[in-house]
Amino acid sequence: MQVAAISMIPAACMVMNRLIPLLPMAGVVVVPLLVPLLMVRVGIGYGLGAALVVVVLWFAMMVRHARMPGHG
């Protein structure tokens, strides 16, 4: 038994279409700024932890919203 997929409402689609191109730029800007600041202000461990968290979340968002040809 298959569950029918619920389509996104048009407003949400518009927001996602505007957000998707910003994800790579956000990752490129946030990681190099956030990590050194945390390393200097708080400690090396917090900077490395923040780098790990930000990179994993960024990668998950990129994979989640990847536009693959032929996959709807």
Image (tube, rainbow, N blue to C red):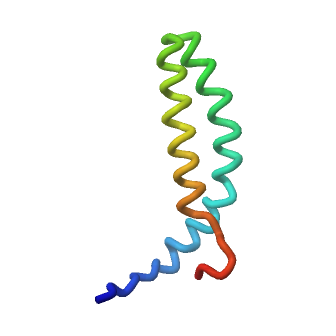
Task: Say whether residue 65 is left or right of residue 46.
Answer: right
Q: Residue at x 68, y 49 (%)?
A: 24
- Name the residue nearer the viewer: 20 or 60: 60
Task: Say whether residue 7 is left or right of residue 18.
Answer: left
- Name the residue nearer the viewer: 67 or 37: 67
Q: How many marks?
A: 0
Q: Residue at x 40, y 83 (%)?
A: 5
Q: Is residue 6 above or below residue 48?
A: below
Q: Residue at x 65, y 72 (%)?
A: 68
Quarter of the image that includes the N terminus: bottom left
Quarter of the image that includes the C terminus: bottom right
Residue extending farthest to the left is 1
Residue extending farthest to the front is 1
Q: Position of residue 7 (x, y in %)?
A: 45, 82
Q: Position of residue 38 (x, y in %)?
A: 54, 18
Q: Position of residue 62 (x, y in %)?
A: 60, 55
Q: Position of residue 40 (x, y in %)?
A: 58, 10
Q: Residue at x 49, y 35 (%)?
A: 53
- Name the residue nearer the viewer: 47 or 16: 47
Q: Is residue 29 above or below residue 63?
A: above
- Name the residue nearer the viewer: 59 or 36: 59
Quarter holding residue 37:
top right
Q: Is residue 69 above or below residue 18?
A: below
Task: Say whether residue 59 is left or right of residue 24.
Answer: left
Task: Say whether residue 39 is left or right of residue 33.
Answer: left
